[in-house]
Image: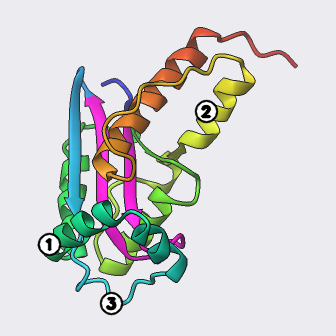
Amino acid sequence: MADIQISFDIETLHTRADGVILSIAAAARVNGSLEVFYSHCGLESQHNRAFSQDTLNWWYKQPELWAKTRELCQEAEPLANVLRDLSRWYSGLGEDKDRLYPWGNGANFDLAFLEHAFDEQGVKCPWAYWTGRDLRTLEQIAKDLDVFESVERVGTHHDARDDAITQLLRIEKCLEAIHGCRTPATV
């Protein structure tokens, strides 16, 4: 089995890992096919999770996106159900779990939120903590090696599905560029 990179993106009401999660998306390429998970999360099930006024104010400045997101969250499954669905989707991507690599856009955001939510909701996280990866770090390495190339954006900013797909393209582009410039390590 080849390595499978899984890009995660979430939309939230806080910048802390215990923040309310509005939506969760993940994108992976399996045997050349794009596989996507996307779900909004019921807000009523997240009374123990935090929100910040600064984040709410940011959402208020996107009134159309905020209205659409709020409406979809009102119709959504409880967070625990969404996490169980995500876990099943993730686990179905391959057989060798050590070859599945979850990526967040920042070392302490998407994956940290999700791991916190899995724990809080009593749902087993489908990945091992040591498999998590960070897109921002990967892009910085590509820039340092002078092999970074941007990719065309897919869809709408702050739509978790579109962001997860765009981030997967960025991961793939960076890995391809970095692998293409390998030089032997010396001491």
**Where's residue 169, x and y in %?**
40, 28
What's the mark number on residue 47?
3
User: Split into 4 quadrants, where in the image is the N terminus?
Assistant: top left
* Extreme-right residue of the structure: 187
Q: Residue 29: which disc?
A: none
Pointer 3 local density, CA inside 10 Å: few below 14, some 14–19, many at least 20: few
Question: Could you give the CA–CA distance between mark 3 and mark 1, rounded to whole angstroms?
Answer: 14 Å
Residue 128 horizontal side relative to residue 143, left or right: left
Q: What stretch is highlighted in magenta?
A: 5-29
Q: Which amino acid does label 2 sit on?
A: Glu
**Residue 97 makes an appearance in the image:** no
Q: In which quarter of the image is residue 136?
A: top right
For the stretch drawn in magenta, what is the main secondary structure? strand
Amino acid type of the residue that numbered disc 3 sits on in the rendered structure:
His
Residue ranking furthest to the bottom: 47
Label 1 secondary element: loop
Residue for badge 2: 139
- In the image, is 75 to the left or to the right of 95? left
The residue tagged 1 is 77
